[in-house]
Image: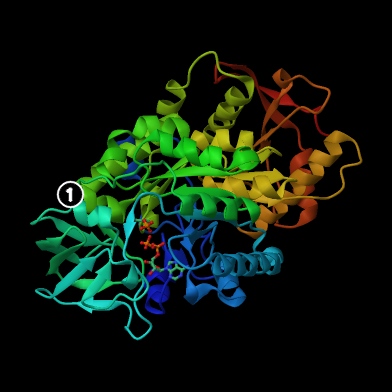
Amino acid sequence: MYRDYKQDLDSRSGASIIMQVGDAGQQMFQGQSFRNIKQSHLQQICTLDVDSPIRTYRMTNIVCTVGPSCESVEVLKDMVASGMNICRFNMAHASHEWHLQTLRNLREAVDKSREVTHGSVATAIDITGPGVRLGRFSEDVEVPVQLQKGATVIMSSDKAIKKSCTKDRVYVIQGFIMRAKVGDKIFIDDGPLCFKVMKKVSLVEMIVEVVHQGEMNHNGLVHIPMTTPNIDEYLSEKDKKDIKFGVDNEVDMVFVSWVLQPEMVTAVREALGDAKDRVAVVAKIESYNSVKRIDEILEVADGILIARGDLGNDIPPEKVFLAQKMIIGRANMAGKPVICAAQICQEAENALYYDATFRDLRFATPVPTNVTHATSIAAVEAAIRGPASAIIVVTNSGRSARLIARYRPHCIIIAITKSQDTARNLNLHRGIFSVIHTGSSNQEWYRDVDQRIHYALRVAVERGYVKPNDKGALLHSAGNQSSPLQAHLCLLQQRYHTAHTEPLCHAISQPLQRYKEIQNGTVKQCLTLSKSFP
Ligand SMILES: Nc1ncnc2c1ncn2[C@@H]1O[C@H](COP(=O)(O)OP(=O)(O)O)[C@@H](O)[C@H]1O
Ligand SMILES: C=C(OP(=O)(O)O)C(=O)O
């Protein structure tokens, strides 16, 4: 049932999708059979079964880039239904007017889909950073321009051709021409088109020859491996204008292309002004330099995007895998979300040995551990021991949900929130499904929480995330009057036998078990809790 949207959309010009998406309605149900606790990675992989029923959900989020082929409300609705979590607007292409109209179309598509998907879609602008790009082609040139091996092209910094490039003569900035040396390879976009510099004609012009055939598009990225674009400032005037556009139009994230040093991320945060606490800054790792400075970049960024295509043009393609594994590991250690920009094999998720990852991450957590943090670790521990098919977390800031996701539970995290902003922002984190519940809360606190949990469970059942007789771990605060130390962690037995509302209410009313003595992130004891709920 899966189709490759990138090919679908690219072939209609100008849009890509970072990961593979499923047909509408199918995306959440692929998966593995229910897991048991395994002692080792080997034991875990020995239990993988080709006959396992398709019943789990997707833990990985999908980031889609929009272009002209998917700008309409109809297509965007289709993408929402197909599971898009983050909609990315690449500011290297198109005008602010186009981006604004498409953003409005997206919001309309999300509103119209709300009943069907319950989902919220985050928005991200992708700023160009110091990467160098070609100009635009003349109206009469058929784009993409196909180039065969051996063809020669003039690269020129003549501004007169900036918007009227031809097959034989393309615009790039002068700094790029000055930096290029005879014999250098120049990659266009993620390849395969590759040129070799044959002759430097002047300071503003050079002749290049196609050594690997491929195609050129408007504003294609131009890169000489292992070279650093010359940057005078961390942010160009264009990037600043694009960030202002993002803030004015309330996007949730900024992806920063070609981050070469941590200061670039800090500069973006500063440019966000008052929106800096609301908007997540994601650093794109697409060069050798950024791989080498990954820890410093991770420290200042809210998340990382591994741009495998461009990275594979800067370092040898066969090393991209090593960089990817290392970066994902370090991002996991740092507790920061990481986007791997390329198609992912969904079945691979089933082979992951979550328990070991959890142990490693817990081991790496500094002691003493803050209570919210420790309780979130305990929620994951409870889910492993259940074993639970979902962790339900009541959260308005999103903090507990993010902390739970950080410990990589094997099961989905259902975050119940009143905040639309939180719901959208959680799309950056792994394995979280946000349920927005805005119902009235002018009643006793526990009844309000109870109602929200019921609602989330109903949605979870409808979507096939939990089933009759499944167990779930539940995390919520102990109410306004209580100290954070009284935070409850409950393992609830969902004893319902059908997927209807009435039995779900029973699920909550059953005596619940509470993990107590949460000490430095380790659950020591399990008690029965019957008083917290009526
Ligand atoms: N808003 C847009 N308008 C026109 N074309 C676009 C737009 N966004 C993306 N594209 C096209 O889709 C291609 C793939 O998108 P993306 O991966 O974001 O671009 P790039 O690799 O250039 O950074 C781009 O090279 C461009 O041709
Ligand atoms: C996602 C990538 O980057 P971009 O689309 O910005 O070129 C990539 O290079 O894989």
Query: Which amino acid, mark 1?
Result: Pro
Identify the element where label 1 is drawn. Answer: loop
Q: Residue furthest right?
A: 443
Q: Is residue 369 above or below residue 433?
A: above
Nearer to us in this view, 208 or 449: 208
Is any part of residue 29 visible from this angle?
yes
At label 1, counting other C-alpha atoms closer than 10 Å, the crowd grade (few under 14, some 14-19, many 20 or more) is: few
Q: Residue furthest top?
A: 368
Specify the quarter for ligand 2. Answer: bottom left
Assign the N terminus to one quadrant of the image: bottom left
Q: Residue, x 41% and y 79% (percent of image)?
A: 12
519 vs 178, left or right, is right
The residue at label 1 has a CB less than 8 Å from ligand 2? no
Assign the C terminus to one quadrant of the image: top right
Nearer to us in this view, 188 or 181: 181
Is any part of residue 408 visible from this angle?
no
Q: How many numbered discs sit on the rendered protein?
A: 1
Residue 278 occupies quadrant: top right
Q: Which residue is mark 1?
A: 316
Measuring from the top left, give residue 381's x and y in whole percent: 54, 29
Measuring from the top left, give residue 388's x and y in whole percent: 57, 40
Q: Residue, x 59% and y 31% (percent of image)?
A: 379
Q: Is residue 469 above or below residue 37?
A: below
Q: Residue, x 42% and y 70% (percent of image)?
A: 5
Measuring from the top left, give residue 311's x and y in whole percent: 28, 50
Measuring from the top left, give residue 282's x and y in whole percent: 47, 44
485 vs 142, left or right, is right
514 vs 158, left or right, is right
Nearer to us in this view, 50 or 424: 424
Q: Residue, x 71% and y 44% (percent of image)?
A: 417
Nearer to us in this view, 385 or 163: 163
Residue 392 occupies quadrant: top right
